[in-house]
Amino acid sequence: MATTIKGHHTGVWGVYLAVAQLPNTSGATEQSPFVRKGHIGITIISGTPAVYICTTPTEGAGVWAQVMHTGSSVTGGLTLSGTLSAEQVTSTDDATVTDDLAITGLLTVGETLGVTGASTLAAVACTTLDPSGLLAAAAAVTVGTTLGVTGATTTTGGIAQAVAMPGVHNIQITGATNGTDKTPADGTQWVTSVFVPANFTCTNIEFLVGSVGGTDRVYGVIYDAAGTVLKNSDLTSDGIVCGTAAQIMQLPLTATQALTGPATYYVGISAKGTTCRIRTLPVYLGGSCFAGDVAQTHATVAAITPPPSFTADEGPYIILT
């Protein structure tokens, strides 16, 4: 028996099957001699055997379905109502999944991948990625043009930079006498938030010295968003003698600190004594960052409760380099 399957120019050879008609409950017999008809077709596509099955109801022609096996390919649409699990999937056109998608190998999509359920992928390479549900990738996700995400995106590894930033700051310093000339107090730390836009390795904390330098010893501390200590400058002998007036003083960290971005961090500056001055953020900069003071024994570094708002004249001008 030979027949034709859409998409193939040559006949498909196979077997024709039928189930004999049985009388219905009234004792009559349908006009058609068969209730169901079946076909099993075999053809060769590019040297690879392809097997098809088709069931035909009495109402008319049925639909051919390809039997998938190692090396199989689908030239038409593939619709799944359940879960697709595969080691590797390649689509040269759009791929749409209305349920969960779980792939342990590489998923390659020529154009658009649309997933409405949860997606757990080892790696993805496609032109356009547009998930409306959860997207979890254990390895790299490469998108050629557009990444569309309708929900929130949380990066645990941060954003890498092609070229490292020279530094980040809370407020740009435009002059040596910016802000308020603040008199420090022993046991008080002046704290400000600093937003880091991408992954950054910090080596130094820098701050703007006020109208008086020298005499008092100072140190700086970097905290994470929760107020946990990440790194500090030298605490030996209560810190380093304050630098020159109206200049930026550099406080080297005891070791470099990797900062993951985008994220908010906090930086505190402490001084032992009331001789030196620190330039702090005035009231009109209140919309730019958080700032405040916290009580802390000098040269004793401990976790803090970060300021939840902006208090004028308490946040120092900070640069992380």
Image (cartoon, rainbow, N blue to C red):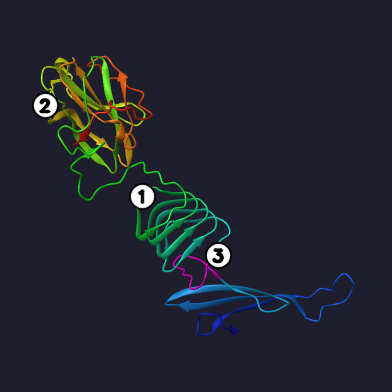
Of callouts 1 and 2, the N-terminal one = 1
Q: Nearer the viewer, mark 3 or mark 2?
A: 2
SS assignment at label 1: loop
Magenta span contains residue 199: no
Q: Residue at x 17, y 30 (%)?
A: 208
Q: Secondary structure at mark 3?
A: loop
Residue 139's disc is: 1
Give the vertical position of 135 relative to 264 (above or below): below
Q: Which comes sooner in the sequence, label 3 or label 1? A: 3
| Quadrant in which the N terminus is drawn | bottom right
Please state if 42 lies on the left or on the right of 286 as rendered: right
> Where residue 297 sits in the image (x, y, percent)?
26, 14
Amino acid bearing label 3: Thr
How dense is the environment of label 3, judged by Cα within 10 Å: few (below 14), some, or many (20 and up)?
A: few
Report which residue position mark 3 lands on: 79
Amino acid at the residue labelled 2:
Ala
The reply to whether callout 3 and callout 2 are in contact (CB within 8 Å) is no
Amino acid bearing label 1: Ala
Q: Nearer the viewer, residue 49 or 83?
A: 83
